[in-house]
Image: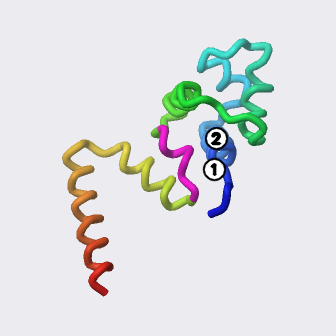
Amino acid sequence: MSNHNPIPMRLKEVRKKAKISQKALGVRIGMDESSASARMNQYEKGRHTPDVRTLKLIANELGVPLNYFFCEDDQMAEAVCLLAKLKDEDKSRVLSILREMSSQKELL
């Protein structure tokens, strides 16, 4: 993928899925009520990129892992969300399966 920034698309997608307005999301993460909507709009339009601390607050508020915002394709975005919900032992099992599948592909 080129220099495409996935953050705006992912942010808008997960915010809409959560059925929360830009303003409400901004206020919930501590932005001033008078500027929350405009700031979130700038993030979703890609005019400005939130710093990692702000992005982490947004991720926590919307119930997604931070790395969700950096996924360049929908399958990876779904995978990180599902993986984040698993217990550590289940994450280890999934990683083992992925390693096995990856090494098998390398042999072909």
Front residue of 61/41: it is 41
Front residue of 83/66: it is 66
Q: Tell me, yes or no, whether the highlighted magenta stretch contains residue 101.
A: no
What x and y, as percent, mark residue 95? 27, 57
What x and y, as percent, mark residue 48? 74, 34
Q: Quadrant of residue 11?
A: top right
Magenta segment's dominant SS is helix
What x and y, as percent, mark residue 61? 53, 28
Q: Magenta part of the protein: which range?
A: 66-72
* Residue found 63% across the figure and 44% down from its top: 7
Q: Quadrant of the N terminus?
A: bottom right
Front residue of 68/4: it is 4
Label ID, residue 21: none
Q: Indicate the amino acid at tag 2.
A: Leu
Q: Is residue 56 above or below residue 88?
A: above
Front residue of 23/106: it is 106
Residue on which the image places disc 1: 6
* Residue found 25% across the figure and 42% down from its top: 87
Q: Left or right: where does residue 104 sit relative to residue 71?
A: left
Q: Is residue 4 above or below residue 20?
A: below
Tell me the SS state at disc 1.
loop
Mark 1 and mark 2 lie on one chain; the one further toward the N terminus is 1
Query: What number of labels is visible?
Result: 2
Q: Tell me, yes or no, whether the highlighted magenta stretch contains residue 68.
A: yes
Residue on which the image places disc 2: 11
* Residue found 44% across the figure and 47% down from its top: 81
Q: Indicate the amino acid at tag 1.
A: Pro
